[in-house]
């Protein structure tokens, strides 16, 4: 009976936590479930930034529930926003959690939204969307 309890606990954690998804030519970073967030407007043209899916030269940590619906062309479904592919424009609420022009962050991975942003992606500004 004990293994079943452990498995159920792991499933619950997996449902609320963030995800790092390899999809075609990019990594899609999806935040854990959040009750709120910053209210700035971000986005731009969706592109691969340092190996991660982002927009306008910034990496985006996409809202919880974002799913990859196609690898080629890379297409994601963002809850409450719709479906977007590489090259599409998006406007999304959130805020910058890392801006290299305004601080002296050491190179390396970066923890945000319940996930670890890989070092290559963290060389760029990071926008946490919700």
Image: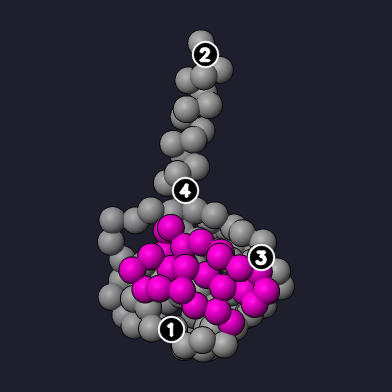
In the rendered view, tell whether residue 10 sits above or below residue 29.
above
Which mark sits nearer the N-terminus, 4 or 1?
Answer: 4
* Label 1 residue SS: strand
Q: For the residues carrying marks 4 and 1, which lies nearer the camera in this image?
A: 1
129 and 83: which one is in front? 83
Task: Look at the image and say whether residue 85 sits in the magenta stretch.
Answer: yes
Residue 7 appears in the rendering: yes
Q: Up-down: is 67 above or below 99?
A: above
Whether tag 2 and tag 3 are in contact, CB under 8 A, the answer is: no
Q: Are marks 3 and 4 in contact (CB under 8 Å)?
A: no
Cα distance between the residues tagged 4 and 1: 24 Å
Magenta region's main secondary structure?
A: strand
Residue beneath disc 3: 23
Residue at x 47%, y 68% (from the top left corner): 77
Q: Earlier in the sequence, mark 4 or mark 2?
A: 2
Q: Earlier in the sequence, mark 2 or mark 1?
A: 2
Q: Which residue is mark 4?
A: 17
* Mark 2, residue position: 2
Measure the alpha-carbon separation of dots 3 and 4: 19 Å
Q: Label 3: state its secondary structure.
A: strand
Q: Residue sitting at 67 percent across and 74 percent down?
A: 72
Residues tagged 4 and 1 counted as in contact (Cβ below 8 A) = no
Kindly state the secondary structure of the residue where label 4 is placed.
loop
Q: Position of residue 84 (x, y in %)?
A: 49, 77
Q: Which residue is mark 1?
A: 90
Helix, strand or loop at disc 2? Answer: helix
Distance (Cα) linking label 3 and label 1: 19 Å
The magenta region covers: 62-86
Could you classify mark 3 by the number of other residues whose Cα lies within 10 Å: few (under 14), some (14-19), or many (20 or more)?
some
């Amino acid at each position: 009976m004990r293994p079943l309890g452990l498995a159920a606990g792991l499933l619950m954690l997996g449902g609320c936590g963030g995800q790092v998804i390899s999809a075609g030519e990019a990594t899609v970073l999806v935040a854990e479930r959040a009750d709120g967030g910053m209210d700035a407007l971000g986005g731009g043209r969706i592109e691969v930034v340092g190996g991660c899916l982002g927009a306008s030269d910034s990496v985006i940590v996409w809202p919880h529930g974002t799913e990859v619906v196609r690898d080629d062309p890379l297409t994601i479904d963002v809850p409450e926003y719709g479906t977007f592919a590489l090259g599409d424009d998006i406007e999304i609420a959130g805020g910058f959690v890392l801006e290299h022009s305004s601080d002296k962050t050491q190179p390396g991975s970066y923890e945000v939204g319940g996930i670890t942003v890989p070092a290559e992606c963290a060389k760029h500004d990071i926008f946490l969307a919700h």
